Image: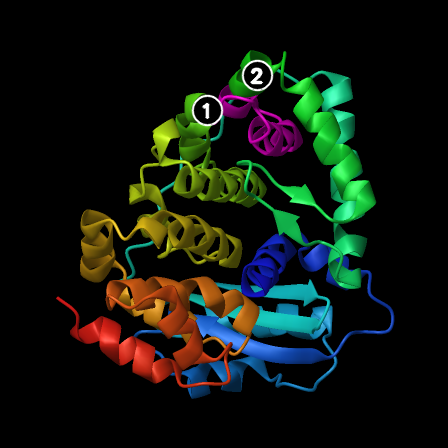
Amino acid sequence: MLHRFIFVAALICSTVDAAADEASTPPVVVGTIDFFGLRQHSESEIRACLKMQEGDPFDRQRADAALGELKKLPGVKNATLAPITTSEGLRLFVGIEEANAVGFVMHEEPTADLRLPEPLMQIFRDFSSALGPAVRSGKARQDNSQGHSLTADPDLRKAEEAALAQMKDNVEVVRVVLKTSAYVEDRRAAAWLLGYSPDKASITDDLVDAARDPDSGVRNNATRALGAIAALADLKPELRIRIDPAVFIEMLDSVSWTDRNKAGFVLEGLTKSNQPDLLQQLRDHAMPDLIEMARWKSAGHAFGFVMILGRIAGWSDEQTRDTWGWGKGDVEIVIAAASSAR
């Protein structure tokens, strides 16, 4: 259970984006640097452009300059830097989208002039303002067993319980705003709120659709909500909650770190039941991405991908955790077992 709480705390950190780090004074020190999307380019080549290493103070201007250099590399279509603040320090993730990469297809921008009711927006603002401090203090542990997040931090918990109360009567307006509103902040709030709907089975398709929203914040909130629902589906199969995994397998090709992080969250939950068809899809379409992210030095963020590989290998979760040792064992043994599985 401790491993699960740490994993969830790592996942929730993805909502504490670069803006939080920009406000840090003095600059925080880079603890780990991890990479994704590298197929034709080597890590050493990307590090040479980055001009930043573990132990250096994180500097926004320096990072922006490095990002510009990364985008100039031959064969690079896009690049991203995600500085993620955790209770254990800053984790820097460097993403590369190479010219021949499949990428991740998103919807067009919605255009409806439709806003959420102000009381609903205020609940989301309260949650958002409390999230960063809770993560940095280590109090953002979550319980997803009811299909939505309930957090240990009292300020976050207050907003979550307010969302539960409001979503008893406001599901339809939230659903429509999520799909059609031209206002990004309203769609972000709607994606988060919809996860607190009392009937999880009825809103999973809405959230899956929102996972292709053109805004990364909307995708992040929708996918995070689905991860909690996946936990409930695993605990109570009699509810017959079904989440189509296809979009999240595709999302593993995204150049956005939050997309990959949350796709891992959902897929880790969906693979717990060891469905043969899903494990085969992951073998056929996602092995390079899963292996790359399982090798991340930030163990809290690698956890879900390591567990998925263990299930592909046919191992029990206990065997995978014991072999990997929370980043202190040998992940290559897990990778080799998954790679040779048929």
Quarter of image, res 108: top left
Seen in the picture, residue 233 relative to 34 is either above or below; the reply is above
The residue nearer to you, when weighing 245 against 145, is: 145
Q: Horizontal placement of 110 versus 150: left or right?
A: left
User: Which residue lies at the image location 42% right of the left edge and 36% below the top edge?
Assistant: 236
Snapshot quadrant of residue 97:
bottom left
For the magenta stretch, what is the residue range?
177-200
Q: Which mark is residue 123?
A: none
Query: Closer to the camera, 221 or 19?
Result: 221
- Residue with the most extreme left position: 342
**Residue on which disc 1 sits:** 203
Answer yes or no: is residue 338 visible: yes
Residue drawn at (70%, 65%) of the image: 85
**Residue 66 percent location from the top left of the image:** 59, 74
Which secondary structure lies at badge 2? helix
Please say whether residue 185 is one of the residues in the magenta stretch.
yes
Give the distance between the C-alpha atoms of the residues marked 2 and 1, in whole angstroms.
9 Å
Q: Which amino acid, by three-letter code, is at mark 1?
A: Ile
Q: Are marks 2 and 1 in contact (CB under 8 Å)?
A: yes
Q: Position of residue 330 (x, y in %)?
A: 40, 85
Looking at the image, residue 231 sits to the left or right of residue 67; the answer is: left
**Dot 2 surroundings within 10 Å: few (below 14), some, or many (20 or more)?**
many
In the displayed structure, 265 sits above or below 165; it is below
The residue pinned by badge 2 equals 171
Q: Quick one: label 2 or label 1, which is nearer the N terminus?
A: 2
Residue 47 relative to residue 122: left or right: left
Q: Tag 1, which secondary structure?
A: helix
Q: Position of residue 209 (x, y in %)?
A: 40, 31
Q: Is residue 68 magenta?
A: no
Which residue reaches farthest right? 25
Residue 272 pos. (x, y %): 36, 53
